[in-house]
Amino acid sequence: MPTRAEAESTLKRWLPDGAVSRVCDYLLANNVSLRIARERTSKLGDYRPPQRGAANHAISVDGSLGREFFLFVLLHEMAHLENRRDNPRSASHGHEWQAQYARLIVDYLDCFPPDLQPMLAKYASRIPLNRRLLAEIEAHMKAMTPGHEAGLTLDDLQAGDLFSLRRRPGTLYRADERRRTRWLCTSLSDGRRYLVSGRAEVEPAPKTPTH
């Protein structure tokens, strides 16, 4: 286990300054193992409860995110931890989880830039959480990520469109069916089907001319 000083030193690379000490307290108090994941397209974070008698909860967050976006995703996973602990039979993203997430956003609101705080406060003010407002918040946070250039997302496409993922340009996919916040897609190289986040940035395949 790292010392508190080591943990804070690591967290400073990924979190806004005002969140470092508080997040460190949370991780230590709740026995959480935090992993910084390589950038990925399927989801930005993940929570796993203790496995096979282990004591640690496990959270991973995409390490390519900007600091504010990283914190926003981390709070999402912390809400999963609390919901699993307090409401083990509730739905993964049900009302109980949404209430936990909204409370955490309010608790950490001052850690976000002033221009984001009103939007986040509005998002956390009502259950069920507003998906359209969430998309606006995430787009704003993506734009704040150093080196990020805004592009098309999977949600901008239509069913049947072909595309490749900006982070994995080597494979062509077909967007088959939208399922809430994800799309069921088929890899044209092997026919396997995947659920891909609608937020994933894509490069549309060139249209084949028709005669």
Image (cartoon, rainbow, N blue to C red):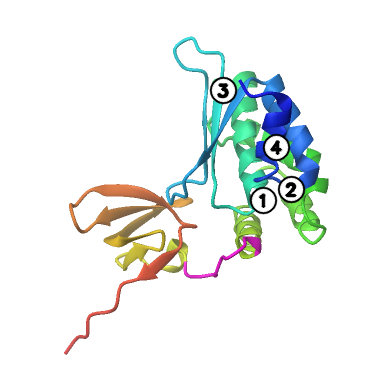
Taking depth in this image into account, of 26 and 206 the one nearest to the observer is 26
Q: Tell me the residue that label 1 is attached to.
A: 67
Q: Earlier in the sequence, mark 1 or mark 3?
A: 3
Question: How far is the residue under mark 2 from the one under mark 3?
Answer: 23 Å
| Amino acid at dot 2 | Pro
Question: How far is the residue under mark 3 from the one under mark 4?
Answer: 21 Å
Q: Tell me the residue that label 3 is attached to.
A: 57
Q: Earlier in the sequence, mark 1 or mark 4?
A: 4
Q: Are marks 1 and 2 in contact (CB under 8 Å)?
A: yes
Numbered circles on residues, count? 4
In reply to whether residue 31 is colored magenta, the answer given is no
On the image, the x and y values in percent for residue 122 come to 76, 53
| Amino acid at dot 1 | Arg
Q: Is residue 173 above or below residue 10?
A: below
Q: Is residue 11 above or below residue 118?
A: above
Taking depth in this image into account, of 168 and 99 the one nearest to the observer is 168
Q: What segment carries the magenta color? A: 144-152
Q: Is residue 209 above or below residue 58?
A: below
